[in-house]
Image (cartoon, rainbow, N blue to C red):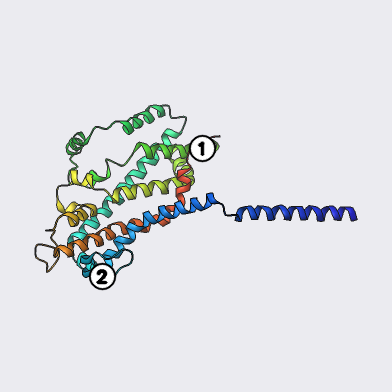
Amino acid sequence: MVTAEKEIAKSGQVAQRRKGEKLRKKKKFTIGKFFVYLTVFILVAFTLYPVVYILSMSFSSLEHLILQDVWLLPKDFTLEAYALLFKTSDLWVAYKNTIIYTFLGTAIGLTFTVALSYAVSQKNFYCRRIVIWFFMITMFFSGGVVPSYILINQLHLINSPLAIALPGAVTAWNMIITRTYFATISPSLFESASLDGAGEVRKLIFIALPVAKPIIAVLALYMIVGYWNTYFSALLYLEERELMPIQNYLQTILYDSNASGTPGQGSTIGGAMQIEQLKYSSIVVAIFPIMMVYPFLQKYFAAGIMVGSIKE
């Protein structure tokens, strides 16, 4: 008994010693870790500084904007630029248009991308290789701007929200990553559902979609950002000013000193420096909704990025 107790005590001491050694190794700060942390800090600083600078300039007074002495924090904090910007009726029209295009495009894109990806991920779909290669070709070859415009025009979609929502609804890249995710779902789940009499639509809705929430969230974020930042498509397919999204309105603020729509300002928004100040506040207003969406969907990025990285 005494010998057994000694052996148990000795094994416990050895385990504690090994645990302590592991903790010391983890806490040990090496030169390699220092350079990794330094590199990450520099990258974060380079990434965040433009955002901080734009925010500071938008909240600084006109005098400091003229002096160009704002480097990090706002000076003489003021909301004059935002008050002037929010008076413009064009801003709210552009915001409404952008919300409509983003919601419509994301809904259409998710519906068709998920349905297509599920179909080509099933081995009992005999034409799946042909469909996959059909979409793969679009990753390497494009008809160009002129044929795209002719197609949209012949479909009578010019000056229509569908002109923004439909052309980019399904992309080869989104189809590939979603198909790869569906392919990782155990086939036994679909087989058991088939034995219970479930069709392909029921299997997609009640089995595939609940499991594929991470990749759907990643797709939704990609599409939301893409449609919110759409600019060139609106420039091509939308001819009426009342249909322009927020990015095209921002372009007007940035480059057109004769932008109209501010009460009491005549034919212009303001003086040259006021327009310069409005540039920063317009950028903040344009990117603010996307900055609010990112934190809620960021947790799904790891699952989306790791799709297809592990082969068994």
Residue 57 appears in which quarter of the rendering?
A: bottom left
User: Which is more toward the observer, 137 or 179?
Assistant: 137
Toward the front, the furthest residue is 31
Q: Amino acid at mark 1?
A: Phe
Q: Is residue 46 visible?
A: yes
User: Which is more toward the observer, 158 or 126?
Assistant: 158
Where does the image place residue 60, in percent across and percent down from the top left?
26, 68
Mark nearest the camera among 2 and 1 is 2
The answer to whether 225 is drawn above or below residue 82 in the figure is: above
Q: Dividing the image into 4 quarters, which one contains the N terminus?
A: bottom right
Q: Which residue is mark 2?
A: 79
User: Which is more toward the observer, 31 or 229?
Assistant: 31
User: Which is more toward the observer, 62 or 93?
Assistant: 62
The answer to whether 250 is drawn above or below residue 170 in the figure is: below
Q: Is residue 1 visible?
A: no
Residue 260 appears in which quarter of the rendering?
A: bottom left
Query: Crowding at label 2, few (<14), some or many (≥20) Cα neighbours within 10 Å?
Result: few
For the point 48% across and 36% down, the residue is 183
Asked if residue 133 lies left or right of residue 1, the reply is left
Where does the image place residue 13, in percent across and percent down from the top left?
77, 55
For the point 74% across and 53% down, the residue is 15
For the point 26% across and 71% down, the residue is 78
Query: Crowding at label 1, few (<14), some or many (≥20) Cα neighbours within 10 Å?
Result: many
What whole-number distance in Å separates the C-alpha atoms at marks 2 and 1?
Answer: 57 Å
Q: Which residue is mark 1?
A: 190
